[in-house]
Amino acid sequence: MKLIRTIILISTLALLPACGGPAIQYGDATGVETTSMGFGSTDLQTIAAKLVDDLLSFPPITQETMTRRPVVFVDTIKNKTTEHIDTESITDTIQTKLIQSGKFRFIDMTAVKAMQAQFDFQSDSGMVDPMKAVAFGKQIGAEYMLYGNMSSIVKRDKKNQDIYYKFSLKLINMQSGILEWMGEKEIRKVGKKGFIAM
Amino acid sequence: MTRPFPLPESLLRSTVLFCLLLLLGGCASSSLFSSYPKQASEFKQAIATDQTGKVLDNLAEKETNADSLLYMMERGRISQLDNLYQESNDDFLLVIDAFEQQDLAAQIQGSKFAAQGASLLTNDNAIPYDGSGYERIFTHHFQAYNYLGRQDIEGAGVELRKARLEQRILLEQHEKEIAAAHEKANAENIDVDSIATNFTGMDTIAGQVKNSFQNGYTFYTSAAFWEAMGELNDALVDYKKAYEVNPSSSMLPSDIARVSSKLGERNQEVDFHQGTDDEGVVVILYEEGFVPAKQQIKFPAPTFDGGLISIAFPYYNTNNWPGSRSLTVVDSTGQEVAHTEEVVNVSTLAVKAFKEDLSGLIVRQVLRGLTKYELQRQAEKEGGYLGQIGASIYNIVSESADMRSWLTLPNSGQGARFYLPKGTQKISLQSGSMRQDITLEIKPKRTVLVRVVDTPPRMIVQVFEL
């Protein structure tokens, strides 16, 4: 009977509904985020910061960018992890930081279609003064390509979870095919199960 | 068991009654008192007759159910077979989230404990369904199809990698878990083995596989995908794993030989066709039938005072076990071009999973039987004849086996691979008396995945170009 009483008590407690409304507030966009084990904003920011620092402080690159701003285009970053990670968002952040450093210029391949439409409008619609229309075939070709991949190793047992991410980024010279620079950022996250929760 | 009883008995009795009523009321919509296989037969019927609208609507209510994991697996599968890839994706996402929450959930959970407590008064169906390993693998596998259906190749790759990862983790944990269940049985002083002898009928089926979660069909799909992507190392590993769980396969050795040779390995004894520059690859992924549901059986178990109580157990009736059909592919000239080969028998995985959980199940069922017996004796003592009748009725009504499992899964998963000349090609898919003609756009050196889900009288075909 003791057993039954305990069970009843616990069942009754479990039936009590959760109380209290939602609490919403603004947070620090660069604050450390550890909501879940998955890839998060902190990972994105540390990867971008580390790789940009690496690239800009690499001696041959410093020399190359001393007098001119080379033109770069960003290829996709291959996601080889077990999570759906928006790798474009990582490269966007890297690209932003590089542009703001004032050392590089970029070709944005995602804008090509829209630009094409605008060119067509300027040349074919008859609404734009041909003298003032943007001329065809004057764009500057990219000298470098930025690309890379991201992989992960996940280990998990009954008590712990361990995720290791490796993000590698490469800068290749399009003309010579020489890999001019390569950077890597590793992140390791460890999660431990709690002992008791309601 | 001693029974000190300091609370006023009438108060306790009304509390018990109140709690029982609450449990009955709260769970009327779940599987607590309406057997799950009965609910699922509607899902299967809906798939087979292509009338899923009503079932999908009904399942919408189950999103917040305690067994939402189970219902969302079913709905994800049903929507997917209706080509509702985005909807199916959302459902499987809920399932994957639920599984991932389990991974990092506290070791002792109040809510789980309460459900276990409630289950002692009713039945195992009161414990929220937390899924089996093989179901988790299928969730990722099918989720990959949702990405393929929306032309997201990278997303599909992520899910297939995830399926591989989860299979590896399950394999690592497998042995430890079985040992832990045995320890618990010993600690509770329950003779698991004597009850387990009632289930030996399933051993012939369960013995066909080493464990319940290594899924040859998932490995085969994943291998075909990676091979098409040019990731030959990944493809080779997955073909080898598929072969490891299907050692008598005649198809997989030539897959392994082909990929090995592409990787530059020579000395291959096995004959294989590599395909010419004007040919494209067609991979058939064939899912046939439905996995069988558990049934209920009652066994007597001894009580503390020498009496006997009847306890309901789930089991798989292997006497009436489904055989598997295969699919034949015929080209436009009537020539047979391929014949599928079974790479996983899901029903076998389900039986194996059941056997793996058996010790834990026996412990829970016996403890529950004893609790109810105690309750019945108490009612008899305090409520006299009426109390006894009431308690007996309650026992009979509430004692029902936990027969839940993902039931829209196929009975078997099969594969086949062949080459067709480039251009528009007509092929005919035939299984038993069913036949479906499809047209494929074959590009040289490229792969087309043709997924065929065969649930008579309906044959569902989904084509993914890689």
Image (tube, coloured by chain):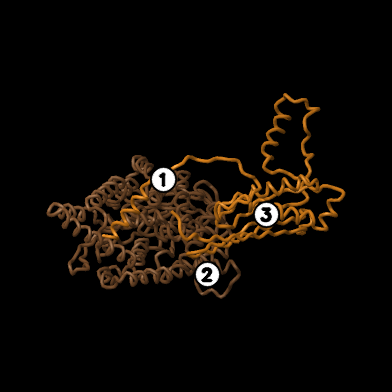
Residue B416 in view of the camera: no
The amino acid sitting under disc 3 is Ile
* Residue at screen point 73% across, 29% down: A122
Q: Circle 2 marks a residue in which chain?
A: B
Q: Are marks 3 and 1 on the same chain?
A: no
Which chain: orange? A
Relative to residue B325, is residue B227 drawn left or right? right
Please give the residue where the numbered disc 3 appears in the rendered image.
A47
Please give the residue where the numbered disc 2 appears in the rendered image.
B257
Q: Secondary structure at mark 3?
A: helix
Please name whichever residue, B243 or B292, is drawn nearer the observer in this view of the structure. Answer: B292
Q: Nearer the viewer, mark 3 or mark 1?
A: 3
The amino acid sitting under disc 2 is Ala
Q: In terms of image quadrants, where is residue B369?
A: bottom left
Q: Circle 1 marks a residue in which chain?
A: B
Q: The N terminus of chain B is located in which quarter?
A: bottom left
From the top left corner, tell me how far across and down residue B152 is, in percent. 55, 49
Q: CA distance from mark 1 to mark 2?
A: 37 Å
* Residue at screen point 64% across, 45% down: A28
The amino acid sitting under disc 1 is Ser
Please name whichever residue, A116 or B163, is drawn nearer the observer in this view of the structure. Answer: B163
Please name whichever residue, B213 or B449, is drawn nearer the observer in this view of the structure. Answer: B213
Which chain: brown? B
Please give the residue where the numbered disc 1 appears in the rendered image.
B79
From the top left corner, tell me how far across and down residue B464 is, in percent. 50, 50
Q: Residue furthest right?
A: A67
